[in-house]
Amino acid sequence: MPHSRFVALVGKDGLTSLRGRSVMLFGLGGVGSYAAEALARSAVGTIYLIDFDNLEPSNLNRQLLALYSTLGRPKTEVMASRIKDIDPEIRVFSYTERLTAENIDRFLSLDPDWIIDCIDDVPMKILLMAKCLSENRKLVSSMGFANKFHPELIEIGTLAETSVCPLAKAMRLAMKQTGLPLTTPVVFSREAPQKTINPDIKLGSTAFVPAAAGLSIAGYVIRNLLEIGAE
């Protein structure tokens, strides 16, 4: 049985519950690709994938989908195929699009049970967070994991509880300016970012920190869907 080890923890009722739930994931990079993988291996019944980008050589060091055989292909296409290969019963809907102010309502109208934000576009992260707060939608957002070496320093908390992370700082400031609360759950690191050795590349990355962040996000969503130590 493909899910026997998982059912041993969550039970048949838990598996059935997850089969009936849906998760929407924005961004399939170093964090998002691992989050999507864990959702698929946890039997989430419907997964929406949104990413505008194609795979390129610079992705090979950290993104699950990046192989020499997949370079040049849309991330959504590769992830959708991978999910179907993991679990053919999952309903996968992929959109090779950038999240914008013009299409955000169309995506949210699909009404997923949970939304995962793994994009790098700060204005769109803020818009998505503000929309989800105003519409009372479940969202967890990824903060920054570039220039870091310590996956053990990754935490989950509200945006108000973040520190050290430059992206989280920018998000806190922007959200305060909108007058919205800093209550959205986020995955972040308390590790101070390192400086890159190469001055031409400001954002360095490892294979293990973004991956750990993505798995942490997926774990948070699965626990909440199953109401296991949920918020």
Image: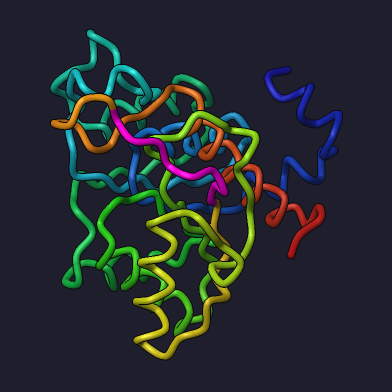
Residue positioned 40% across, 23% down in the render: 64
Reply yes or no: does residue 194 show up in magenta. yes
Q: Is residue 196 above or below residue 119?
A: above
Residue positioned 42% across, 65% down in the render: 169
From the top left corner, tell me how far across and down residue 71 is, in percent.
18, 17
Q: Is residue 106 above or below residue 178?
A: above
From the top left corner, tell me how far across and down residue 55 is, in percent.
21, 26
Q: Camera-side residue: 112 or 142?
A: 142
Residue positioned 19% across, 18% down in the render: 57
Quadrant containing the C terminus is: bottom right
Can residue 37 be seen here? The reply is no
Q: Residue furthest top?
A: 68
Q: Camera-side residue: 93 or 114?
A: 114
Q: Is residue 47 left or right of residue 76?
A: right
Q: Is residue 97 left or right of residue 50?
A: left
From the top left corner, tell me how far across and down residue 230 is, in percent.
76, 60
Residue positioned 16% across, 71% down in the render: 102
Reply yes or no: does residue 50 show up in magenta. no
Magenta stretch in the rendered image = 188-196
Number of dots carrying numbers: 0
Q: Residue 191 sits in which quadrant?
A: top right
Can residue 28 be seen here? The reply is yes
Q: Residue furthest bottom?
A: 179
Q: Is residue 86 left or right of residue 222?
A: left
Quadrant containing the N terminus is: top right
Q: Main secondary structure of the magenta part?
A: loop
Q: Camera-side residue: 36 or 90?
A: 36
Q: Is residue 170 above or below residue 146?
A: below
From the top left corner, tell me how far across and down residue 14 is, in percent.
78, 45
Q: Residue 180 sits in which quadrant?
A: bottom left
